[in-house]
């Protein structure tokens, strides 16, 4: 799933937000169902992620206008949890990644994000009124 990353960046650990890792995939025609099965919330990637500590959940969403375009959204306790997982399960990660390459025409990292606490945001807005 992850091809390459600049590992020199210091891990984010805000204490109040979860680390979110978002990837975009363009799936080969005819491979959509298999892709959804493997990359979905109960798929092979999520099962592998669950073996490491700090993985919270994985979401798979499909573009409503471009049917072969998908995003995966992986939630981790913090960025360090992801990279610890990548070190501990490097072999399994690369094996699964290689076996899935045939399903996609392209993939790209959209970015690294911090989840915003929705309740805290609502309270801040209420306090301004």
Image: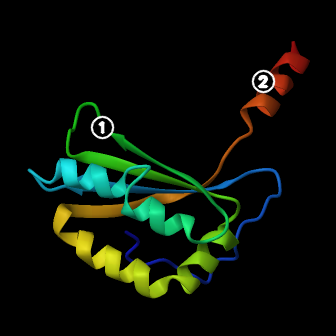
Residue farthest toward the right in the current orientation of the protein: 127
Residue 99 vs 18, above or below: the answer is below
In the displayed structure, does residue 22 sit left or right of residue 3? right
Can you give x and y, in whole percent of width and height, for residue 51 in the image? 56, 70
Q: Name the residue under label 1.
A: 63
Q: Residues within 10 Å of mark 2 (few under 14, many from 20)?
A: few
The spot of residue 80 in percent (x, y) is 69, 73
- Residue marked by disc 2: 122
Q: Which of 51 and 99 is in front in this view?
A: 51
Q: Is residue 127 left or right of residue 53?
A: right
Position in image of residue 107 (x %, y %): 30, 62
Considering every residue shown, the one lying at the far left of the view is 30
Vertical position of residue 85 compared to residue 117: above or below: below
Is 65 placed above or below 53 here? above
Question: Considering the numbered disc 1 on the image, is that residue within a helix, a strand or a loop?
Answer: loop
Residue lying at 21% horizontally and 54% vertically, measured from the top left = 34
Mark 1, other Cα within 10 Å: few <14 / some 14–19 / many ≥20? few
Tell me which residue sits at (24%, 75%) in the image: 99
For image coordinates 63% across by 79% down, the residue present is: 84
Where the N terminus falls, by quadrant? Answer: bottom left
Q: Give yes or no for contact between labels 1 and 2 (Cβ–Cβ under 8 Å).
A: no
**Residue 93, horizontal then vertical, whole percent:** 42, 78
Relative horizontal placement of residue 46, taking residue 27 as reference (left or right): right
Residue 106 image-quadrant placement:
bottom left
Screen quadrant of the C terminus: top right
Front residue of 52 and 59: 52
Q: Is mark 2 on a helix, strand or loop?
A: helix
Q: How far apart are marks 1 and 2 (CA)?
A: 28 Å
């Amino acid at each position: 799933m992850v091809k390459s990353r600049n590992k020199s960046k210091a891990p984010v650990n805000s204490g109040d937000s979860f680390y979110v890792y978002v990837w975009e995939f363009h799936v080969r025609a005819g491979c959509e169902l298999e892709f959804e099965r493997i990359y979905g919330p109960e798929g092979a990637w999520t099962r592998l992620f669950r073996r490491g500590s700090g993985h919270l959940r994985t979401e798979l969403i499909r573009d409503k206008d471009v049917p072969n375009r998908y995003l995966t959204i992986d939630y981790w306790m913090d960025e360090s949890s992801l990279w610890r997982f990548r070190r501990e399960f490097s072999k399994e990660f690369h094996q699964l990644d290689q076996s899935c390459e045939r399903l996609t025409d392209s993939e790209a990292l959209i970015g690294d994000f911090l989840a915003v606490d929705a309740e805290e945001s609502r309270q801040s807005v209420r306090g301004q009124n």
